[in-house]
Amino acid sequence: MTFTIVAHDPATRTVGLCQGTSAMGVASRCTHVRSGVAAVASQSHSDWRIGRRALDLAQSGLDPAAIITALETTDAHFAYRQVGIVTPDGRVAAHTGPSCGPYAAHLV
């Protein structure tokens, strides 16, 4: 089981995330942060490319909800993914695919 928090501090406009899980190597594929751009967490059948693509889209100015849509259109397995995004200005979006399991969810 994995728990993730993706957050921002409105006073400093910093972003960050924290994950707790029993899976090995989570930090190498699930946590993605780019200073001044966004924090992105991906989990449940994770694919490290999702986080990097989301950061690139955020850097181009795309809104987090639009980033989720863009990721969905290019990932044939998006129904098995969970993604959370926050930008330094506090915009957020999250996705929990319907194939992630009966106890998978997100709260924004």
Image (spheres, rainbow, N blue to C red):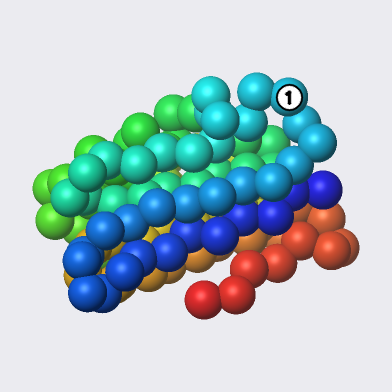
**Left or right: 36 as drawn, with respect to 95:** left
Q: Position of residue 72 (x, y in %)?
A: 47, 50
Q: Position of residue 38 (x, y in %)?
A: 29, 52
Q: Position of residue 78 (x, y in %)?
A: 58, 46
Q: Amino acid at mark 1?
A: Met
Tell me the residue at 73%/24% (across/down).
24
Classify mark 1: helix, strand or loop. Answer: loop
Q: Give the image quarter of residue 44.
A: top right
**Left or right: 43 as drawn, with respect to 88:** right
Tell me the residue at 53%/24% (across/down).
28
Q: Position of residue 16 (x, y in %)?
A: 40, 53
Tell me the residue at 21%/65% (across/down).
13
Residue lying furthest right: 102
Taking the image as drawn, is residue 68 in sight? no
- Residue indicated by mark 1: 24
Q: Give the image quarter of residue 9.
A: bottom left
**Left or right: 1 as drawn, with respect to 76:** right
Q: Is residue 11 above or below residue 43?
A: below
**Left or right: 80 as drawn, with respect to 78:** right
Taking the image as drawn, is residue 18 in sight? yes
Q: Is residue 52 above or below residue 70?
A: above
Q: Give the image quarter of residue 23.
A: top right
Q: Nearer the viewer, residue 9 or 102?
A: 9
Q: Nearer the viewer, residue 33 or 85?
A: 33
